Amino acid sequence: MQFQPKMTVAELNEFVKEVFPESIQYLWHAEEILPGGIRVSMKITEKDLRPGGTISGPTMFSLADVTAYLLILAHIGKVALAVTTNLNINFLNKPVHGDLIAEGTLLKLGKRLAVCDVRIFSVVDHQLVAHATATYSIPPAK
Amino acid sequence: MQFQPKMTVAELNEFVKEVFPESIQYLWHAEEILPGGIRVSMKITEKDLRPGGTISGPTMFSLADVTAYLLILAHIGKVALAVTTNLNINFLNKPVHGDLIAEGTLLKLGKRLAVCDVRIFSVVDHQLVAHATATYSIPPAK
Amino acid sequence: MQFQPKMTVAELNEFVKEVFPESIQYLWHAEEILPGGIRVSMKITEKDLRPGGTISGPTMFSLADVTAYLLILAHIGKVALAVTTNLNINFLNKPVHGDLIAEGTLLKLGKRLAVCDVRIFSVVDHQLVAHATATYSIPPAK
Amino acid sequence: MQFQPKMTVAELNEFVKEVFPESIQYLWHAEEILPGGIRVSMKITEKDLRPGGTISGPTMFSLADVTAYLLILAHIGKVALAVTTNLNINFLNKPVHGDLIAEGTLLKLGKRLAVCDVRIFSVVDHQLVAHATATYSIPPAK
């Protein structure tokens, strides 16, 4: 894999708390950083649930989006403020009530655009519940 | 337009509150139903904001998703429990702090799948801030 | 609408033939340019058909892609070489055998990215057969 | 992996030639079938090229689409006529002139919908040139 991380898990989680203080309300954090990859876990609470005990679409969207964000930050360092330009998500299986884990993989890390693949699993039964592809725009270095 | 609504705005908002009680936390409701179309407004609160006062991606995603859901319900009636299978969203312009309005249009209303186009505007400056295409799976009638 | 075309239909079709000579094999051309919009027609031949007389997915993809390309060119002028970065297409109804017409609309025309909405209709029965959203990357002006 | 193929590579390529005779013009065929996966190669000819020697978007789209189709057929057998309902493609790197190889993976194989991940590589330099997610609708068994 040609991608090399520029931050450790501790540095990444620390940096996100600084620049993005409201992130605490989402209850997610990076678990592991690999070359070109990341694992992010998310605690599910009552407000994430839908009738029948399943997890809401917006909750899975927000996990996919933040996983791509953390993945890119981990590989470009503390410099840039990337923003989502496109996110395509497929909901594959209804998740049971329980925490989620997301695995993100860099597909491209260009000067202007980064593209990430994100797979979301239930920690309860390890089922793949959603798949997303996200594009972030990377602002020009100053 | 070949699509005919089966519910009024009042019936739709009432029905959603019944089957989906936690919807109240999102602060959205249908404003107008047209043949093949809908307008949905969403109140933005502190928890929807990101650094700099802009509105978060998950908030816009949840508005796009619920607009497609309300649009489909309005045209198939109280019978079915549709679920999102795919949602593709493009973030076009950073919204300023203020409420949002979404315009949904049916592209297809088949027996098994419905496809909707959703455009999200800021009520402050009327700028188009996001565009989404959503596919819902419609369960077989019993 | 805030978008203003910079080329006429004749200038656009002429320019495309020059820079993109193999475009002739596709049998499409711009019909009309509007502020923020375009109409492109495409002749369907035997090689575009699938069993049962319907039109192939790749043919509709190529019409969606070229419509976005022509739409952007018409609004930025002869300067830039834009490339597709993302295209999301929903196939809505099986087209009958017959020519296609595409209507493209600019959703965003930024310095780096342009986003277009494209709807494809059959000229035979005016049915909406496909809907696409395309993102193009615009290279920096030299 | 929970997916089990129902056809060999030889059976699959034979079946496609029968039901889809014009497939020969595209110059692709399945190379390998794995549980939940497939590899498909595509010969690139003059008509697939764009100015500068790169490969056209519609060519990569058609490879992504057929890879998903072959992947699903290989896992549901000769029974059903699946059709593409959605395809989202990201163009990541400009392919050099040379043949392409696609790796498809099943994300979901439901009764009504199948969702596939497809990655397209250049055989010349092994670079990832495009990534697609495709949804197929599977008709009800008779």
Image (spheres, coloured by chain):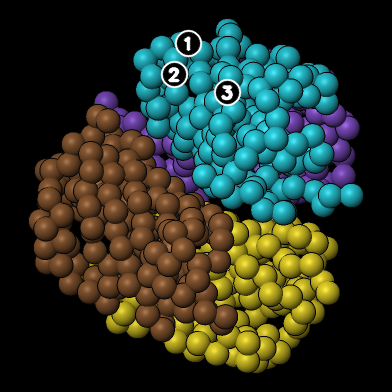
Chain colours: A cyan, B purple, C yellow, D brown
Tell if the residue under mark 1 belongs to the same chain as the one under mark 2: yes
Q: Residues within 10 Å of mark 3 (few under 14, many from 20)?
A: some
Q: Is the C-beta separation of discs 1 and 2 under 8 Å? A: yes
Q: Quadrant of residue C126?
A: bottom left
Give the label, 3 or 2, closer to the camera.
Answer: 3
For the residue marked with disc 3, what is the amino acid? Glu
Name the one closer to the observer, B96 or A35: A35
State left or right for residue B55 relative to residue C106: right
Q: Going 47% across and 52% down the picture, which residue do you hit?
A: D131
Task: Residue A122: give its label.
Answer: 2
Q: Residue at (82%, 39%) from the top-left corner?
A: A79
| Residue type, label 2 | Ser
Q: Judge from the rendering whether residue B93 lies leftward or rightward of residue B139; answer left or right.
A: right
Name which quarter of the figure residue A28 lies in: top right
Both marks 3 and 2 on one chain: yes
Location of mark 3 (residue):
A32
The kind of secondary structure element at disc 3 is strand
Label 1 to label 3: alpha-carbon separation = 20 Å
Kind of residue sitting beneath label 1: Gly
Q: Is residue B31 visible?
A: no
In the shown orientation, is residue B58 left or right of residue B1? right
* x then y, percent, for residue D58: 45, 69
Is residue B86 among what the camera can see?
A: yes
Q: Measure the C-alpha gap from mark 1 to mark 2.
A: 7 Å
> Which numbered dot is residue A66?
none
* Among numbered discs 1 and 2, the one appearing first in the sequence: 1
Q: Chain of mark 3?
A: A
Label 2, residues with CA under 10 Å away: few <14, some 14-19, many ≥20:
many
